[in-house]
Image (cartoon, grey):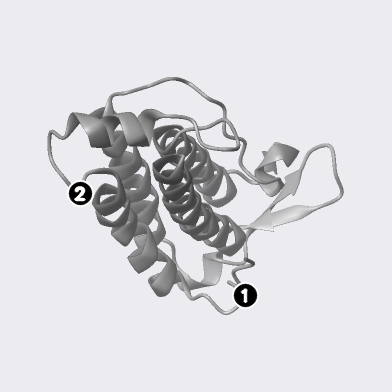
Amino acid sequence: MTLDLSALSPQDGIAALRSYPRRFSALLCPISGDDTWISIITRPGPEGMSALDITRACATRISDLSQALDVILIEQSPQLPGTLAEPATVVASGTQDVPAQLRALDAATSALASRAERVPAGDWGRAAHLDSSDGELSALDVLREAVRTGSDGLHKVEETINSVRRA
């Protein structure tokens, strides 16, 4: 599934980011304290990662994008790693600390949304050069990538939970 974010406004992006902690929590914590459910969300799915691993990767990626937005808006000739233009990498971690992962996601999305709220309208077009490529990434591209990361993460978490439950 490809999400077209080409028309996503900064305000809509901020609203989406602010919704992710609640939406991830609804998938990961439908039944508080249920040990069976904990085993479902921490068990690796068909791609080798658990729903909680995917959540952790989303939080890390959104945090990285938040830092990238700061670089674009603060530095004179900003440079960013080319990896920011690539899909996020999810690595199995074996973590079972659901509250910690949800707090990390909340912190990352809140930080980026708060920073995005303070961006002057004329600065959304500011861009950074991506090292190791000829590409550029604008402030608005960063926000859109964070929204894509969260949306893709939600879908992957749901797919992983459903796969594990069927297994």
Q: Which residue is drawn at 38% across and 65% down?
A: 16
Q: Nearer the viewer, residue 87 or 68?
A: 87
The CA span between labels 1 and 2 is 33 Å
Q: Which residue is drawn at 52% across and 75% down?
A: 8
Residue 88: percent from left, percent from top: 61, 41
Q: Going by the picture, which residue comes out furthest to the front? A: 167
Q: In this view, does 91 lie to the left or right of 42?
A: right
Task: Tell me, yes or no, whether the two marked residues, 1 and 2, touch with CB atoms within 8 Å.
Answer: no
Q: Going by the picture, which residue comes out furthest to the left? A: 33
Determine crowd level at label 1: few under 14, some 14-19, many 20+ residues with C-alpha closer than 10 A. few
Q: In which quarter of the image is residue 86?
A: top right
Q: What mark, if any, has residue 160 been given in the picture?
A: none
Q: Residue at x 42, y 52 (%)?
A: 158
- Of marks 1 and 2, which one's residue comes earlier in the chain? 1
Q: Going by the picture, which residue comes out furthest to the top? A: 94
Q: Quadrant of residue 130?
A: top right
Query: Badge 2 is on which residue?
Result: 30
Residue 161: percent from left, percent from top: 41, 45
Q: Is residue 128 left or right of residue 96?
A: right
As drawn, 78 above or below 33: below
The kind of residue tagged 2 is Pro
Q: In this view, does 29 lie to the left or right of 83?
A: left
Q: Which residue is drawn at 30% across and 57% down?
A: 23
Residue 149: percent from left, percent from top: 52, 52
Q: Is mark 1 on a helix, strand or loop?
A: loop
Query: Badge 1 is on which residue?
Result: 6
Determine crowd level at label 2: few under 14, some 14-19, many 20+ residues with C-alpha closer than 10 A. few
Q: Nearer the viewer, residue 48 or 133?
A: 48
Residue 81: percent from left, percent from top: 70, 36
